[in-house]
Image (cartoon, rainbow, N blue to C red):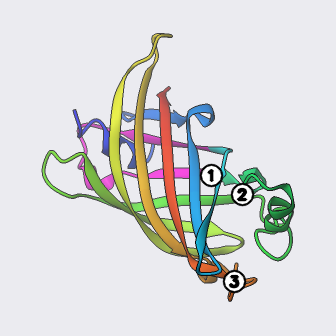
Amino acid sequence: MFSAGIFTLLQSPELKADTYVIDNEHSSIRFSIDHLGISRTTGRFGNISGVFSFDPSRDIATAKTKVFVKTQSIDTNNDKRDALLRGFSFFNVTKHPVAMFKSTSLTQHKSNSKTGRVTGELTLAGHTHTEIFDVEFTGEGRDPWLGYRMGFIAKGSIKRSDYELDFMAGAIGNDVSLEIFVEGVKK
């Protein structure tokens, strides 16, 4: 079941592949970052989209996914801070309205494990870097509307300086912890 599970999220759509569309209403990206070395500020991106697919006859390592995030959807529960984050000093959402992650490889931690590691290219604020996330398959099955769904959580961290998001570097940490919660609906 896991082979038809976690690694579904990371395969390019092919003729035989089962394709899943990310359900924005049941998916999100949460983040946290150090503030003044005292605590952590948290937030989320609420508008994500993309696809993942799986062909059970192919090697899991060929899996791929594309995830798109509307940077305008950043929400830290503080309107002034959100406006600053959307502005020129940080995400510059007018110039860079979408961030994208495109996977390049996936490894399974152990045979039949529900965990693995995904590597891919993250494009954020006009800069692209390779990032690695731990991923965990969370479930799959029929929904009440006779559809089929699959979910996973990916966790990792990125350095904001890699994407030239280094405004207020002394007050705000460089390492951004990310948790990506995805639920997809089979097409």
Question: How far apart are the alpha carbons under marks 1 and 2?
Answer: 6 Å
Label 2 or label 3, whichever lies nearer to me, is: 3
Instruction: Please name the residue shown 52% across and 73% down the image.
Output: 158
**Which amino acid type is shown beneath numbered disc 2?**
Val
Horizontal and vertical percent for residue 74? 73, 55
The magenta segment = 49-68
Question: How far apart are the alpha carbons under marks 1 and 3?
Answer: 29 Å
Q: Is residue 85 above or below residue 4?
A: below
Q: Earlier in the sequence, mark 2 or mark 3?
A: 2
Q: Is residue 49 above or below residue 18?
A: below
Instruction: Please name the residue shown 58% across and 60% down the image.
Output: 31
Horizontal and vertical percent for residue 166? 70, 83
Secondary structure of the residue carrying tag 2 is strand
Horizontal and vertical percent for residue 112? 15, 45
Q: Quadrant of residue 47?
A: top right
Instruction: Please name the residue shown 46% across and 70% down the image.
Output: 131
Q: Relative to the observer, which residue lies in front, 106 or 87? A: 87
Instruction: Please name the residue shown 43% across and 26% down the image.
Output: 149
Q: Relative to the observer, which residue lies in front, 128 or 134? A: 134
**Residue receiving disc 1:** 68
**Residue receiving disc 2:** 98
What is the number of the mark on residue 171? Answer: 3
Discs 1, 2 touching: Cβ within 8 Å: yes
